């Protein structure tokens, strides 16, 4: 149940990002749900591999390159989800940052924590 609630919060966060950034658009709530699921899968499967591969540059930039990886993955998901559009790399970077901030804060507020 908690996982479904987090998924819903992430979908709503994606809609909020689309509302706040004109360069990111989501066609419907269904598209937001599908995109939130795909972002979760990509962040679970592909992101750790990319972080490991780019570890030297990540160390040199004191971890800031992880933001670039997040932006690229956000842009990557937008490239194959119909109805989810990101204008470019900088929009993807800003959208990924805003998405993570909104979803973290909303999850902290709305999702009950297990003891």
Image: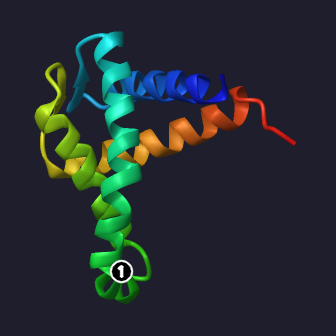
In this image, 40 relative to 25: left or right?
right
87 or 84, nearer to the observer: 84
Position in image of residue 53 (x %, y %): 27, 77
Residue 42 versus residue 55 in the image, above or below: above
Residue located 70% across and 29% down the image: 111
Relative horizontal placement of residue 7, taking residue 66 as reference (left or right):
right
- Mark 1 highlights which residue? 58
Quick one: SS at disc 1? Answer: helix
Q: Is 18 placed left or right of 88 in the picture? A: right
Q: Position of residue 103 (x, y in %)?
A: 53, 36
The residue lying toward the viewer, choosing from 44 and 15, is 44
Query: Picture coordinates of residue 12 (x, y %)?
Result: 47, 21
In-image side of 104 versus 94 (left or right): right
Q: Which of 72 and 98 is in front in this view?
A: 72
Residue at the image position 42 percent from the left and 42 percent from the top:
98
Q: Residue 24: x percent and y percent?
A: 24, 31
The answer to which image quadrant residue 110 occupies is top right
Q: Nearer the viewer, residue 29 or 38?
A: 38
């Amino acid at each position: 149940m908690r996982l479904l609630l987090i998924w819903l919060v992430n979908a709503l966060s994606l809609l909020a990002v689309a509302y706040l950034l004109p360069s990111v658009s989501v066609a419907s709530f269904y598209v937001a749900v599908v995109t939130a699921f795909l972002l979760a899968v990509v962040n679970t499967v592909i992101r750790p591999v990319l972080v490991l591969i780019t570890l030297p540059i990540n160390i040199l930039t004191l971890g800031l390159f992880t933001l670039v990886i997040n932006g690229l993955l956000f842009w990557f998901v937008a490239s194959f989800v119909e109805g989810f559009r990101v204008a470019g790399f900088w929009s993807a970077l800003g959208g990924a940052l805003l998405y993570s901030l909104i979803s973290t804060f909303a999850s902290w507020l709305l999702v009950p924590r297990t003891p």
